Amino acid sequence: MADVEGCNIPEDLYYWIEKHVWAKPENEVVLIGLSDVAQSLAGKIIVVNLKSAGKTLARGKSGGTLESGKWVGSIPTPVAGEVIEVNEAAKANPSLVNDDPYGKGWLLKIKPSNWEEDKNNLETGESGVASYRAKLLKEGIKCAK
């Protein structure tokens, strides 16, 4: 896992860097969540509202909303497809999104309609980390721990 300006950026995930969300393919589904950068910028997450299982989402459409003491925003989905599961634990305990954004703080499981196409719009590996680093340095973003 790379550390960029105090932000954890795992190399094995696919990132929509501009939107600060990640995707992780697991068998026939893709796990979706907020990056460490996003949770740090948002501050302490106090409310997690997610779209229901069975809902079909286009890439870039909202998969739900998050609320912190200083921010309310939507969660853009980096892949198109059907929501097959939501993280009920994160809804019940929103601090999971802050404490473990790449693990217990995941948000949605989506059965992608075209993963091969969607992943071409995302960045991963060392080049993904390099692109994230460039964005953080350009915008002066650091993660608070």
Image: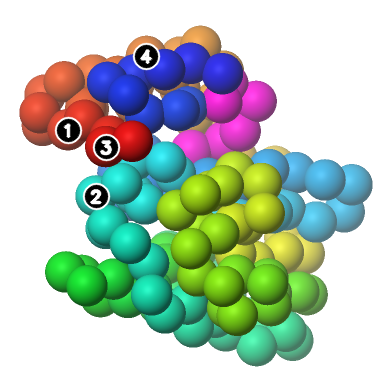
Mark pair 1, 3: CA separation: 10 Å
| Residue that carries the numbered disc 1 in the rendered image | 141
Mark pair 3, 4: CA separation: 20 Å
* Image quarter hosting the N terminus: top right
Q: Which amino acid does label 1 sit on?
A: Ile
Helix or strand or loop: what does disc 1 sit on?
A: loop
Helix or strand or loop: what does disc 3 sit on?
A: loop
Mark pair 4, 2: CA separation: 19 Å
Mark toward the start of the polypeptide (4 vs 1): 4
Mark toward the start of the polypeptide (4 vs 2): 2
Q: How many labels does the image show?
A: 4
Residue 144 is tagged as: 3
| Residue that carries the numbered disc 4 in the rendered image | 130
Residue at coordinates 33% horizontally, 62% vertically from top-left? Answer: 44
Magenta segment: does it hold 12? yes
| Residue that carries the numbered disc 2 in the rendered image | 41
Mark toward the start of the polypeptide (1 vs 2): 2
Q: Which amino acid does label 4 sit on?
A: Ala
**Dot 4: few (<14), some (14–19), or many (≥20) neighbours within 10 Å?**
some
Mark pair 4, 1: CA separation: 14 Å
Residues drawn in magenta: 10-15
